[in-house]
Amino acid sequence: MAQSYRALFRISGTIPLTTAGLIARMPLSMIGIGLITMVATDRGSYAFAGALAAVFAVSSALATPQVARLVDRFGQSRIVPLAVMVSGAALACLLVTFRLDGPLPVIFVSAAVAGLLPSVPALVRVRWVGLLQREHDRAVRETPTGGSKSRLATPGLHTAFAWETVLDDVSFVIGPPISIGLSVGLFPEAGPLVGGVLLLIGAGWLIAQRETEPRPGRHEITLGPLSVLRERTVWGIVLVMIALGAILGTVDVASVAFAERQGIPAAASVVLAVYALGSALSGIIFGAVATRRPTRLLLRVGLIGTAVTTLPLIWVGTVTSLSVSVFIAGAFFAPTMILATKLIEETVPARALTEALTWTTAGLAFGVAIGPAVAGPLIDALGPSGGFRVSLVAAVILIALLPLVTRIGPSGIAPSEATLPEPPGQT
């Protein structure tokens, strides 16, 4: 297993790439929950907190794919710094206005503009695709017998995507506790403030790595802002990611409520750590395994496994049983996300890959935001089991989405693969 990762990170530029990506993706999980904690601790209004976080989440979900379209057209180094500066300035305006007890319209408008973020996981994954394809092409040129240059067969890409999915898991698990701890332990604005600083540092380091930056599109983009969603697989995977995010976010908040109900609130951190451990370990192992089965078929197994393993959560009675349940559930989570991302890479033309991957990341973040929002009132009314029931509903939605994203023909190929039209002049 370790050999797959050693081979991957022996390639020049991969360690700085993935490290910068980890730092820059942390704000995706820190800012939203940081805004909730900021308002709740300082003003005591969960309605205000939820509304502000919802504005930021919806804005991010809608804006980041449009930023990605511009990245596909003009390149990361031209678009990402501009997006980061606009988002960072808006976040700073929000925090200062809140600190000074300024007007609410300014706070909410600033939250909407702060959502103009680049999707760092998508930026990094696209760099992996280009980097590994170039490495593959170089090896082919140096091999007398030659070999295939298919983008879909690029060696190491499965392992790279698995590794990045593990980092996604890590960021969404450790980001919220860090943000909450900063806002509670230092001052209310500390959580989102540190998230914004990490975005500036990580994105700046990523953009400075010009050797791994993919070439921008060399053609005019004439498709609309929702163009990639015309491919059934893309919008199907976005819906899958929303459901997965809802499960992740709801399990987090319900686990906290469960530990508090048991009289040992500190145990929530143990439960969430076990959840992350199960997902991370399975992701690392899955990334080192060569898969020969069609991605859609494997994704079907992952979706069913993820859905089924949420069922025991509504019956747990102790912190120990909850920890065991979330560990098993986490073991299916990372491979499912890896396969969903891999299916996007296999389906979407390279010219629109950043945008398509960004839609999936936006879907996950949106699910993480709306899951706890729906579960919160149910937890107040029914206790922790009310929150876990929301996870179960999201799991049922995953099953309902199976025909949309995993239908395959006799050859193992989906009936409508890569339906996005190619630009004029392309062969």
Image: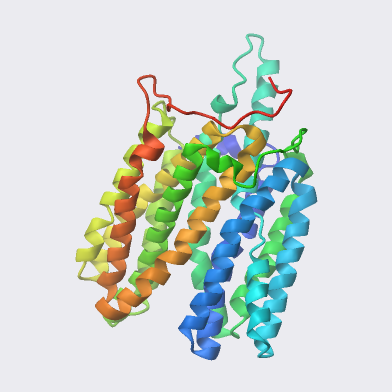
Front residue of this view, candidates 275 and 74:
74
Q: Is residue 337 above or below residue 105?
A: above
Q: Is residue 138 above or below residue 228?
A: above
Q: Position of residue 82 (x, y in %)?
A: 78, 58
Q: Can residue 142 be seen in the rendering of this structure?
A: yes
Q: Position of residue 35 (x, y in %)?
A: 56, 76
Q: Residue at x 53, y 66 (%)?
A: 175
Q: Residue at x 56, y 38 (%)?
A: 6
Q: Is residue 36 above or below residue 325?
A: below
Q: Position of residue 426 (x, y in %)?
A: 71, 23
Q: Is residue 8 above or below residue 24?
A: above
Q: Quadrant of the C terminus?
A: top right
In the rendered structure, the answer to whether residue 242 lies left or right of residue 10 reads: left
Q: Can residue 125 be seen in the rendering of this structure?
A: no
Front residue of this view, candidates 236 and 79:
236
What colouring does the structure picture have? rainbow
In the rendered structure, the answer to whether residue 60 lies left or right of residue 138 reads: left
Q: Residue at x 35, y 77 (%)?
A: 377
Q: Position of residue 318 (x, y in %)?
A: 22, 71
Front residue of this view, candidates 166 and 81:
81
Q: Residue at x 39, y 46 (%)?
A: 282
Q: Quadrant of the N terminus?
A: top left
- Res. 276 image quadrant: bottom left
